Image (cartoon, rainbow, N blue to C red):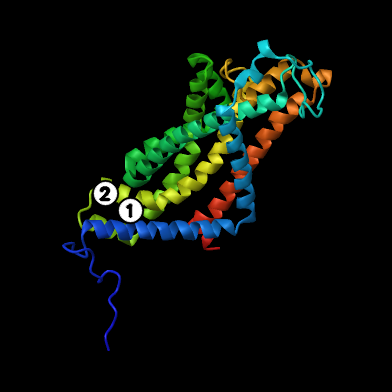
Amino acid sequence: MRVAPTQAERPGPPGEAPSSPRSARAVAWARRRRALARFWAAYRRSAMGMAGLAMLCFFVGLAIFATFANDTGTNPALASGPVLHPPSLRYPFGTDRFGLSVLTLTIHGSKISLLVGLSATAITVVIGAVVGIVAGYRGGLVDVLLMRLTDFGLVIPWLALAIVLASILGPSLGTIIVVIGLTSWPGTARLVRAQTLSVKERPYVERARALGASPWHLVTRHILPNVFPVIFANTVLVVAVAILSETTLSFLGLGDPFSISWGSILESAFAAGAATIGAWWWLLAPGLAIVLVVLGFTMCGFALDEILNPRLRQR
């Protein structure tokens, strides 16, 4: 009886060996596509994750629209609407003290708020991942020093440190991004270090080390791919924290005075006494946007954690 050849035994194109680098890359890409398909199938089964993703897609769409839309509706010098007008058909969320539509301001503010949140998260994740992997892999004195630095960052109130840094660097969009990124990485570093300590003791890592693999090879080929799912799930949660941090700093007047964000809208509303004069609609739209975006990222983060976190999958 003749047995059909397996995928690895089937001949490739003429002149190409079955185990050539090209065929190996094709197998690797096919494996990644299958893993991605399994991940998406698991994610779709999470009602919470899909609801959070729908919220985020909506606000990302608003940010993209604001990027290409005309921004004349945010210029006080060109305002033509009634001042502090309550919600109506023409102004669904009312107007501010200049006669600008609060809804228009909120839509344009989504661009800056999401940009700051994602950019600050990138800094946070890179620093936290590098510190966590180096500390967990190297161990010894390096681990002790990096973890003491991490503990120092965890015990210091981030808001006080952020205010000091923002005051030194001056109010700007870049300052907000850098300040949030430099004050938010310790939690990520702790999480990544714990996962690295678990992965580096696994048998396949020990075998690769015994065969003479370099530390760079071990980290990039064995440790990082297994730590990445935890980093990815944590990243989504960090974005929510970064957006709240941007709102807080902008509300305190430490943001870019020339950019419109949800935090700056709230800051201008409180500065004008919206809470005392009864202009509640001025606070409603940006506040609701912040709550929904943070809720969306949090729901996606919890759904990803259930799928990608090995300890939760075993329960």
Q: What is the number of the mark on residue 222? A: 1
Q: What is the number of the mark on residue 217? A: 2
Give above or below for 18 relative to 306.
below
Identify the residue at the far bottom of this view: 1
Image-based side of 285 in relation to 239, left or right: right
Decide which of 144, 15 is in the foreground and name it: 15
Q: Position of residue 310 (x, y in %)?
A: 48, 58
Image-based side of 202 in relation to 255, left or right: left
Give above or below for 25 relative to 253.
below
Image-based side of 233 in relation to 265, left or right: left
Q: Position of residue 145 (x, y in %)?
A: 37, 35
Decide which of 273, 31 is in the foreground and name it: 31
Which of disc 1 and disc 2 is earlier in sequence? 2
Q: Amino acid at mark 1?
A: His
Crowd class of label 1 (few under 14; some 14 to 19; many from 20; radius 10 Å):
some
Give above or below for 252 relative to 33.
above
Q: Position of residue 301 (x, y in %)?
A: 56, 47
Q: Amino acid at mark 2?
A: His
Give above or below for 82 relative to 44.
above
Which quadrant would residue 69 be assigned to in this image?
top right
Identify the residue at the far left of this view: 15
